[in-house]
Image: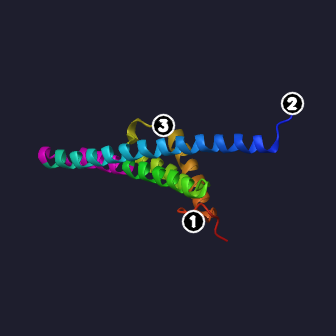
């Protein structure tokens, strides 16, 4: 197998790095669109609650939509931090996972869910909370804090 020169290897690394940046920019654009649409959906849910007076079910749906919007915004922030620093802020991803888990807990039907499901959710939540607590990281820069 022929050996690649150091200059050629650097060119390849630069090219692949540029491709990943273009992909991340595309993801950021899509996340922005989804966040705007999700926010609009949340407003429409509030209007629907006010017009139909289905408070209990409607409020849960609004909270569900708002938490989805927060998840999308946090993912967008993660992508922007990566584009600025070339580091993925792991703590921010753990917070996104915790928010998604809380969103799931809000909408599951207690009477139809197995005990093992709750046990699994509890274990996952404990691991995520421990990770957020133990990982002292600046969410906006991705740098570890001593």
Label 3 with label 1: CB-CB less than 8 Å: no
In space, the residues marked 3 and 1 are separated at their CA atoms by 38 Å
Query: Residue 137, how many percent across, how many down?
Result: 60, 64
In space, the residues marked 2 and 1 are separated at their CA atoms by 44 Å
103 left or right of 19 in image? left
Vertical arrangement, residue 99 with respect to residue 143, above or below: above
| Label located before the other in sequence (2 or 3) | 2
Q: Which residues are magenta?
A: 51-67
Q: Which mark lies nearer to you, 2 or 1?
A: 2
- Is any part of residue 68 visible from this angle? yes
Q: Residues within 10 Å of mark 2 (few under 14, many from 20)?
A: few
In space, the residues marked 2 and 3 are separated at their CA atoms by 59 Å
Give the residue number, with chain letter if any, for mark 2: 2
- Is any part of residue 94 visible from this angle? no
Task: Tell me the residue at 40%/42% (across/down).
Answer: 110
Task: Tell me the residue at 47%/41% (across/down).
Answer: 26
111 left or right of 90 in image? left
Give the residue number, with chain letter if any, for mark 1: 138
User: In the figure, residue 8 lies in which quadrant?
Assistant: top right
Quarter containing the C terminus: bottom right
């Amino acid at each position: 197998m022929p050996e690649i020169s150091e200059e050629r290897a650097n060119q390849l690394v630069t090219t692949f790095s540029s491709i990943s940046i273009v992909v991340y920019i595309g993801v950021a654009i899509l996340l922005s669109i989804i966040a705007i649409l999700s926010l609009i959906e949340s407003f429409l849910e509030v209007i629907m609650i006010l017009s139909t007076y289905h408070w209990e079910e409607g409020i849960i749906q609004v909270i569900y939509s708002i938490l989805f919007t927060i998840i999308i915004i946090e993912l967008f922030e993660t992508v922007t931090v990566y584009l600025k620093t070339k580091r993925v802020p792991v703590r921010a991803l753990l917070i996104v996972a915790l928010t998604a888990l809380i969103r799931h807990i809000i909408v599951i039907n207690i009477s139809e869910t197995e005990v093992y499901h709750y046990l699994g959710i509890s274990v996952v939540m404990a691991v995520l909370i421990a990770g957020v607590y133990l990982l002292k990281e600046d969410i906006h820069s991705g740098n570890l804090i001593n």
